[in-house]
Protein backbone atom coordinates (compact mmCIF):
# COMPACT_ATOMS: atom_id res chain seq x y z
CA UNK A 1 0.00 0.00 0.00
CA UNK A 2 2.76 2.45 0.90
CA UNK A 3 4.59 1.68 -2.35
CA UNK A 4 1.51 2.78 -4.29
CA UNK A 5 1.31 6.03 -2.29
CA UNK A 6 4.97 6.77 -3.05
CA UNK A 7 4.45 6.03 -6.74
CA UNK A 8 1.40 8.31 -6.91
CA UNK A 9 3.30 11.10 -5.11
CA UNK A 10 6.25 10.66 -7.47
CA UNK A 11 4.03 10.87 -10.54
CA UNK A 12 2.24 13.94 -9.19
CA UNK A 13 5.60 15.53 -8.46
CA UNK A 14 6.81 14.73 -11.99
CA UNK A 15 3.58 16.16 -13.41
CA UNK A 16 4.05 19.38 -11.43
CA UNK A 17 7.71 19.67 -12.48
CA UNK A 18 6.69 19.26 -16.12
CA UNK A 19 4.06 22.01 -15.82
CA UNK A 20 6.52 24.34 -14.04
CA UNK A 21 9.13 23.69 -16.74
CA UNK A 22 6.62 24.52 -19.46
CA UNK A 23 5.58 27.67 -17.61
CA UNK A 24 9.24 28.69 -17.63
CA UNK A 25 9.34 28.16 -21.41
CA UNK A 26 6.27 30.38 -21.81
CA UNK A 27 7.89 33.08 -19.69
CA UNK A 28 10.94 33.11 -21.99
CA UNK A 29 8.80 33.75 -25.09
CA UNK A 30 7.37 37.12 -25.96
CA UNK A 31 3.71 36.08 -25.79
CA UNK A 32 0.77 38.27 -24.93
CA UNK A 33 -1.51 37.38 -22.01
CA UNK A 34 -4.31 36.66 -24.51
CA UNK A 35 -2.20 34.17 -26.49
CA UNK A 36 -1.21 32.24 -23.38
CA UNK A 37 -4.66 32.39 -21.76
CA UNK A 38 -6.41 31.33 -24.96
CA UNK A 39 -4.02 28.38 -25.35
CA UNK A 40 -4.59 27.18 -21.79
CA UNK A 41 -8.36 27.65 -22.11
CA UNK A 42 -8.39 25.72 -25.38
CA UNK A 43 -6.35 22.92 -23.80
CA UNK A 44 -8.71 22.72 -20.83
CA UNK A 45 -11.69 22.62 -23.19
CA UNK A 46 -10.14 19.85 -25.28
CA UNK A 47 -9.07 17.90 -22.19
CA UNK A 48 -12.56 17.97 -20.69
CA UNK A 49 -14.67 17.65 -23.86
CA UNK A 50 -12.77 14.71 -25.39
CA UNK A 51 -12.06 12.18 -22.64
CA UNK A 52 -9.58 9.56 -23.74
CA UNK A 53 -8.72 11.42 -26.94
CA UNK A 54 -7.58 14.69 -25.40
CA UNK A 55 -3.89 14.51 -26.28
CA UNK A 56 -4.61 13.43 -29.87
CA UNK A 57 -7.20 16.19 -30.35
CA UNK A 58 -4.87 18.73 -28.72
CA UNK A 59 -2.09 17.78 -31.13
CA UNK A 60 -4.48 18.18 -34.07
CA UNK A 61 -5.62 21.57 -32.75
CA UNK A 62 -2.03 22.72 -32.36
CA UNK A 63 -1.21 21.60 -35.90
CA UNK A 64 -4.32 23.13 -37.49
CA UNK A 65 -4.62 26.40 -35.57
CA UNK A 66 -2.11 29.10 -34.84
CA UNK A 67 -2.19 28.87 -31.05
CA UNK A 68 0.37 28.82 -28.28
CA UNK A 69 1.44 25.16 -28.34
CA UNK A 70 2.89 24.94 -24.84
CA UNK A 71 -0.14 26.67 -23.32
CA UNK A 72 -2.51 24.19 -25.03
CA UNK A 73 -0.52 21.25 -23.65
CA UNK A 74 -0.55 22.75 -20.16
CA UNK A 75 -4.31 23.15 -20.40
CA UNK A 76 -4.72 19.51 -21.39
CA UNK A 77 -2.40 18.45 -18.56
CA UNK A 78 -4.57 20.31 -16.03
CA UNK A 79 -7.46 17.98 -16.90
CA UNK A 80 -5.95 14.73 -15.68
CA UNK A 81 -7.29 11.57 -13.98
CA UNK A 82 -7.16 13.20 -10.56
CA UNK A 83 -9.18 16.26 -11.54
CA UNK A 84 -11.62 14.28 -13.68
CA UNK A 85 -12.47 12.04 -10.73
CA UNK A 86 -14.08 15.12 -9.18
CA UNK A 87 -15.36 16.71 -12.39
CA UNK A 88 -17.09 13.77 -14.11
CA UNK A 89 -19.81 13.23 -11.47
CA UNK A 90 -20.68 16.94 -11.69
CA UNK A 91 -20.51 16.75 -15.47
CA UNK A 92 -22.83 13.74 -15.55
CA UNK A 93 -25.43 15.43 -13.33
CA UNK A 94 -25.26 18.58 -15.42
CA UNK A 95 -25.69 16.60 -18.64
CA UNK A 96 -28.50 14.50 -17.14
CA UNK A 97 -30.33 17.71 -16.28
CA UNK A 98 -30.15 18.92 -19.88
CA UNK A 99 -30.92 15.66 -21.69
CA UNK A 100 -33.52 14.33 -19.26
CA UNK A 101 -31.66 11.16 -18.27
CA UNK A 102 -33.74 8.17 -17.25
CA UNK A 103 -31.86 5.20 -15.77
CA UNK A 104 -32.30 1.96 -17.71
CA UNK A 105 -34.06 -0.67 -15.64
CA UNK A 106 -33.59 -4.45 -15.69
CA UNK A 107 -30.30 -4.29 -17.57
CA UNK A 108 -26.88 -5.56 -16.57
CA UNK A 109 -24.44 -2.84 -15.48
CA UNK A 110 -22.02 -3.73 -18.29
CA UNK A 111 -24.60 -3.89 -21.08
CA UNK A 112 -24.39 -1.84 -24.25
CA UNK A 113 -27.84 -0.36 -23.52
CA UNK A 114 -26.69 0.89 -20.13
CA UNK A 115 -23.44 2.24 -21.56
CA UNK A 116 -25.28 4.19 -24.25
CA UNK A 117 -27.79 5.59 -21.77
CA UNK A 118 -24.92 6.84 -19.55
CA UNK A 119 -22.76 8.24 -22.35
CA UNK A 120 -25.14 10.90 -23.68
CA UNK A 121 -25.54 12.83 -20.40
CA UNK A 122 -21.81 12.48 -19.69
CA UNK A 123 -20.78 13.83 -23.09
CA UNK A 124 -23.28 16.70 -22.96
CA UNK A 125 -22.14 17.53 -19.43
CA UNK A 126 -18.49 17.31 -20.46
CA UNK A 127 -18.98 19.85 -23.25
CA UNK A 128 -20.81 22.24 -20.90
CA UNK A 129 -18.16 21.79 -18.18
CA UNK A 130 -15.40 22.16 -20.79
CA UNK A 131 -16.80 25.49 -21.89
CA UNK A 132 -17.21 26.76 -18.31
CA UNK A 133 -13.79 25.52 -17.19
CA UNK A 134 -12.20 26.93 -20.34
CA UNK A 135 -13.62 30.37 -19.58
CA UNK A 136 -12.41 30.12 -15.98
CA UNK A 137 -8.97 28.95 -17.13
CA UNK A 138 -8.78 31.88 -19.56
CA UNK A 139 -9.60 34.44 -16.86
CA UNK A 140 -7.19 33.00 -14.29
CA UNK A 141 -4.36 32.47 -16.78
CA UNK A 142 -4.74 35.92 -18.31
CA UNK A 143 -4.64 37.59 -14.92
CA UNK A 144 -1.73 35.49 -13.61
CA UNK A 145 0.35 35.87 -16.75
CA UNK A 146 -0.31 39.60 -16.91
CA UNK A 147 0.48 40.22 -13.22
CA UNK A 148 3.44 37.85 -12.87
CA UNK A 149 5.20 38.17 -16.22
CA UNK A 150 3.84 40.53 -18.83
CA UNK A 151 3.53 43.64 -16.66
CA UNK A 152 7.15 43.23 -15.45
CA UNK A 153 8.44 42.71 -18.99
CA UNK A 154 6.78 45.88 -20.27
CA UNK A 155 8.56 48.03 -17.61
Image (cartoon, grey):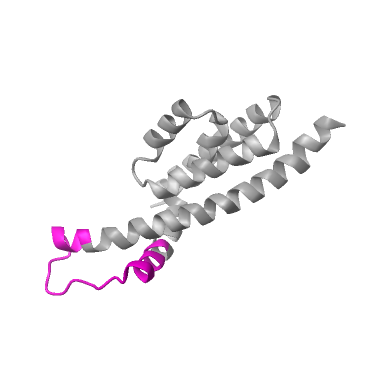
Q: Is residue 80 left or right of residue 109?
A: right
Residue lying at 83% horizontally and 31% vertically, measured from the top left:
154
Q: Is residue 144 left or right of residue 53?
A: right
Tally of numbered discs: 0
Please state the horizontal and vertical placement of residue 83, each as a whole percent of the image: 47, 53
Residue 6 appears in view: no
Quadrant of the image containing the C terminus: top right
Q: From this viewpoint, which residue is outermost toward the right? A: 155
Please state the horizontal and vertical placement of residue 137, each as a whole percent of the image: 59, 49
Residue lying at 41% horizontally and 66% vertically, measured from the top left:
94
81 in relation to 59, above or below = below
Residue lying at 48% horizontally and 47% vertically, measured from the top left:
45
> Does the stretch in magenta take in 31?
no
The answer to which image quadrant residue 30 occupies is: top right
81 in relation to 37, above or below = below
Please state the horizontal and vertical placement of residue 53, each as a whole percent of the image: 34, 40
Please state the horizontal and vertical placement of residue 19, each as a whole percent of the image: 57, 36
Residue 25 appears in view: yes
Magenta stretch, residue numbers: 91-116
Q: Is residue 93 left or right of residue 26?
A: left
Q: Is residue 52 left or right of residue 66?
A: left
125 in relation to 106, above or below = above
> Does the stretch in magenta take in 100?
yes
The answer to which image quadrant residue 34 occupies is: top right
Residue lying at 75% horizontally and 41% vertically, measured from the top left:
146
The answer to which image quadrant residue 55 occupies is: top left
Amino acid sequence: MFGIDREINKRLSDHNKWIHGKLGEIAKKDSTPHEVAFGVALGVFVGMATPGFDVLVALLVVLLLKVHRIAVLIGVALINPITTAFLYPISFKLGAFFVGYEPVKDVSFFSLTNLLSLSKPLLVGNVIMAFLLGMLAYAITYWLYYVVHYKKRKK
